[in-house]
Image: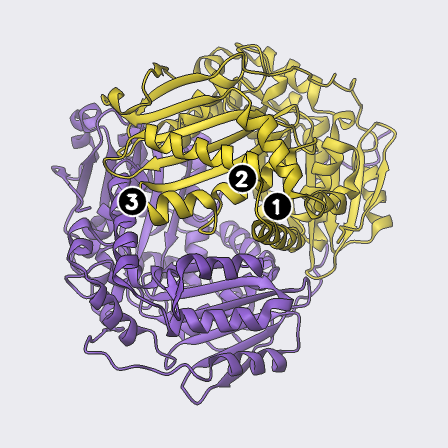
Amino acid sequence: MQIPYTKRTLSNGLDVIVHEDHQLPMVAVNLWYHVGSKNERPGRTGFAHLFEHLMFEGSEHHNHGYFPPMQRAGGLVNGSTSTDRTNYWEVVPTGSLELALWMESDRMGYLLPALTEDKFTNQRDVVLNERRQNYENRPYGMAGMALSAAMFAPDHPYHWPTIGAPEDLRAASLADVHAFFKTFYHPANASLALAGDLETDQAFDLAEQFFGDLLPGPVPDPVRVEASLAASANIVLEDRVELPRIYLSWHSPAMFADGDAELDVIADVLAHGKTSRLYKQLVYERRIATDVSAYQHSREIGGVFQMSATAAAGVSLAELEAAIRSAVTQIATDGPTQAEMERALAQSEAQFLYRLQTIGGFGGKSDQLNAYNTYLGDPGYFDRDRQRYVNLTAGGAAAAARRWLQDAPLVALSVVPRGRRELALPGATEVHVS
Amino acid sequence: MSRVDRSRLPVPGPDRPFHFPRIAKRTLPNGLEVRAVTHTAVPIISIVLLVPGGSAADPADRHGLVSITAGLLDEGSRGQSAIEVADRVARMGGDLDLEVGADAVVVALTTLDRSVEPALALVQELVSAPNLLADDFNRIRNLRLERLRQMKDHAGAMAERAFAHAIYGDHPYGHLGLGTTASLTRATVDETRLLHAALFAPEGATLVVVGDRPAGELLDLASAAFADWHATTSTMVVDRAAALASPPAVPLVKLGVVSRPGAAQAELRIGHACAPRATPDYHALLMLNTILGGQFVSRINLNLREDKGYTYGVRTGFDLRRGIGPFVMQTSVGSDVTVPAILEALREIRDIASTRPATDDELSLGFATVSKGYPRGFETATQVARSVAQLALHGLPDSYFEDFIPRLAQVTRDDVSRAAARHLDVDRMTTLIVGDLDKMARSLPDLGLGPHQVLTPEI
């Protein structure tokens, strides 16, 4: 199983990756900048994400909105920001490939001359709205921030959320924003994937034509910070919720590192779907939880393994916590059963196949080529990624669970209804997230 | 030296033509309509079974019964437990969805090509032989009651619930699929058995199979798997046409507020009952929506987000259904700008139907957006299967996809203005706010919508 591709690097350092797929008369343009919130610093958080907004507000030679020409072309356009990278993409009819490349290259090369104080202020307000809508006004919406803050020291770049702190966003100046752009948004810190109804040679010619004369900047130094917990922590957050929920969070391997795939399977076996151990035990049989979840959230410079369960009416979080920890101990001791391993393998094989269905957008083939290229320098890693799961053993999964979960400190977070601190795990310390 | 002319944007070249899926059809002796489409991209099979009669077919005092019955389909069948059924899905690498819309129940299973036979057999089993046991019913009902409790904290869900009731009242579209605490508490497992027998029948249902095999072979496989599905008798009468009744001519609420003290944002809904999917104005409404609020560059979003910075985003939609579906504008704004945001939104809706009709440029932009992006909706097997199922739900011809763009091209500015005048009536609209009433009560009179009603949606 592969995503066939050709890769070349332009003289200014821009990686270009091309994949042909002529099923639809459409082309996907996908551009990754290797910058995320982990490249920010305390007191100036939220910049990478704020840029994701500003990149749609016009550049020197097209100082209008990014959307109208794209929508006139029938294109779909979006972008997103994580701790590790920012991606921008268009899916356009074949005949509009040059238009998309023109616009992507213009905002890479010529954004700052068009960036005014007005645009900046307006988009900062939009981001503050986004923050209230998607985090503050959503049940359990602040749990992620509370966990990150407890898991990572204040100077670790995963300590703060991608959306940024409101006071940082308000304090940001246009000069800060210019400096951030110059450091991170240039060809030598980017990767361009073109996929779909195009010819490989023609695609490289177009990439050279539109991006070839943009000036590179110095490649930013990789961020390397170790993270660990000296001891377990027990915290509580009050929120506008009806049912208390417990989160358990451990440090875990970074993306593609040893133990990453193993913990993915551990998460599946423990809490993914009705066949998982904890769903069966807590939701289906004992009925003490309304939902359970587990996932290995692997990122570039470190991962987090997170589990959660929401208490059914009248059930204590301590009871849920005990059940979860006992399930962790059991799988760390005995590993997944053969039936669980077969099921996990079947699901993983299907998931890789499903990932070949779309050329563009979040998670489409162009996005995956860029992910492998940005994090590993190898766009062709798709099949080796799949092999990580094919080659997994129950013993290896158990060993990863022992090393990263059973024997390791963790953060326990209780989210409880306002004014109901007594529903938290005993001894929890109150935290506030703004 | 620049190799690019940056003085103007490149003009898009011609688009390669795209041909929409050919649909193979067969009617089985039991009345089931089967559709098959060959889709060659990846060896994946998508199975979609559409049963007409969604939450709008709920008995009047049993809101939520259709949804919980559909939800029980994969909680055990033919003597196997829910866990055993889930294990079969997982082992074929499958992705199973049970969805209850206002007009239909959809069972969708996407899986690998090599599992096509067990997958078809499983879908047939789920709809024809669910266990519907009391213990499973109680378990699922409790989970749903807990979900209802949690919904109180979710501003968007509260808005949706209060808004549907404000514009539809007791009409079948006036309640949401999940039902209420009271109605779910009254429901019994026996009622789910009666409803299942009445609703899940081959006659009237449509099965769509899409995958990388000849369409004839897909039809044969589907026919073999579903030949033994037979209607059963039930003492419960399900009214699949209930939604065709007229909604209230005047909304029950002009300005409603669901109080949410301390809320960080105000969740807004504005709209009214509007038109059925079968309206001859369908294509004109699609263009109208694209111009007014259906996409990023639409009038309302450019105004409220890009010009004013009031919101992260705002959208309008004509949710056209078998019965008269709603027009809805929805957004979430900072509490302090609730009133100006509503005034601007109402002004935009009023203006497009009167003083500022759609321009030629907006019309051509809207047409290009929708028509040029149209093939994108047929990229995956699941997208194709769902599109074909929609044709069945709304009785649209097989040539619908092929005819869509030429038909859209015929829409004129006058058509859009007429559609706006006919289908958007600001004076008849309900404005609903879910937010901190204390923070905004003093400014609400500035809306000019009369006194506000404090709403407590039944949960």
Residue B376 falls left or right of residue B187:
right
Instruction: Determine which residue is flagged by label 2.
Output: A267
Instruction: Determine which residue is flagged by label 1.
Output: A361
Please tell me how crowded label 3 is: few (under 14), some (14-19), or many (20+) other residues with Cα within 10 Å. some
Q: Report whether residue A295 is seen.
A: yes
Q: Quadrant of residue A12?
A: top right
Instruction: Determine which residue is flagged by label 3.
Output: B147
Q: Position of residue B161 (x, y in %)?
A: 25, 48
- Chain shown yellow: that is A
Residue at point 20% right, 55% down? B184
- Chain shown purple: that is B
Q: Which mark is residue A423?
A: none
> SS class of the residue under badge 3?
helix
Q: Are marks 2 and 3 in contact (CB under 8 Å)?
A: no
Q: Nearer the viewer, residue A205 or B204?
A: B204
Name above or below for residue A288 compared with residue B439.
below
Residue at point 80% right, 31% down? A14
Residue B459 falls left or right of residue B1:
left
Q: Position of residue A82 (x, y in %)?
A: 58, 29
Q: Position of residue B72 (x, y in %)?
A: 34, 61
Q: Amino acid at mark 1?
A: Gly
- Mark 1 against mark 2, which lies toward the viewer? 2
